[in-house]
């Protein structure tokens, strides 16, 4: 049986199974609530790109080709609000990036640009609960640390805030490609 969602006035239909794909999402609790007079569950969310959310619910993936940076940021917020893991690339925050690191590919890739014995760190623009990392180890890698921290735990490095998200040590050339999950 199809379930109808009224998303900001636009209707979407899917199965209960799809809505329960992510048990901690807003959809799981929405189904415990009442329907409106038309038998729909109402979500006060902008429907403009809600089709992407539906694709993720159905297939756990969605392409974002052709979307502007603004639209992608809006989508990130919608996914976060609905507590659905967004298959969007993680963006790193240039304001919280060591001067020995460089960001490229729309701030989704981190490259070490200068040799240093000091930790080189960068934060993502959104909080993450889980991430994956791809290393480019063409140079000799002696040590590499990757981990989580909070903004409050940042320490100043070269007059910039730094985190243990990407901590490099001597002889490292690194490239981080997080495939993100909130």
Image: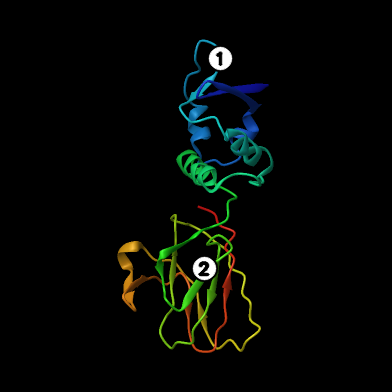
Residue 47 pos. (x, y %)? 54, 29
Q: Mark 2: few, some, or many residues within 10 Å (few <14, many ≥20)? A: many
Between residue 21 and residue 153, name the one nearer to us.
153
Going 34% across and 62% down the picture, which residue do you hit?
151
Q: CA distance from mark 1 to mark 2?
A: 48 Å
Residue 2, image quadrant? top right
- 16 is higher (above) or lower (below) than 110: above
Residue 138 in the image: above or below residue 110:
below
Q: Which of pointers 1 and 2 indicates the residue nearer the eye?
A: 2
Colouring scheme applied when the structure was drawn = rainbow
- The residue sitting at 45% across, 79% down in the picture is 100
Q: Going by the image, does 176 lie left or right of 128?
A: right
Tell me if label 1 and label 2 are in contact, CB under 8 Å.
no
Q: Earlier in the sequence, mark 1 or mark 2?
A: 1
Closer-to-camera residue (34/127): 127
Q: How many marks?
A: 2
Q: Residue at coordinates 45% horizontally, 87% vertically from top-left? A: 116
Please tell me which residue is depicted at 51% across the width and 42% down the height of the picture. 79
The residue at the far top in this view is 37
Which mark identifies residue 79?
A: none
Local secondary structure at mark 2: strand
- Looking at the image, which is closer to me, 19 or 132? 132
Where is residue 177? Give x, y as percent: 59, 65
Across and down, in percent, residue 114 comes to 49, 84
Specify whether 157 is left or right of 173.
left
Identify the residue position indicated by label 2 in the image. 103
Give the class, few, some or many, for how many residues have Cα within 10 Å of label 1's Cα (few <14, many ≥20): few
Q: Report which residue position mark 1 lands on.
A: 39
> Helix, strand, or loop for circle 1?
loop
């Amino acid at each position: 049986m199809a379930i109808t969602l009224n998303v900001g006035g636009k209707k979407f239909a899917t199965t209960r199974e799809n809505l329960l794909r992510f048990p901690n999402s807003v959809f799981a609790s929405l189904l415990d609530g009442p329907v409106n007079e038309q038998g729909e569950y109402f979500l006060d969310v902008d429907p403009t790109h809600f089709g992407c959310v539906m694709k993720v619910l159905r297939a756990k993936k969605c392409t974002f080709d052709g979307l502007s940076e603004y639209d992608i940021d809006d989508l990130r917020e919608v996914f976060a609000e609905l507590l659905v893991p967004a298959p969007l690339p993680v963006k790193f925050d240039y304001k919280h990036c060591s001067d020995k690191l460089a960001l490229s590919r729309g701030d989704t890739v981190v490259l070490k640009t200068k040799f240093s014995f000091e930790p080189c760190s960068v934060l993502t623009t959104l909080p993450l609960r889980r991430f994956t990392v791809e290393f480019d180890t063409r140079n000799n890698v002696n040590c590499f640390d990757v981990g989580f921290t909070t903004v409050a735990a940042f320490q100043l490095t070269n007059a910039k805030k730094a985190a243990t998200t990407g901590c490099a040590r001597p002889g490292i050339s690194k490239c981080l490609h997080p495939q993100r999950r909130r």
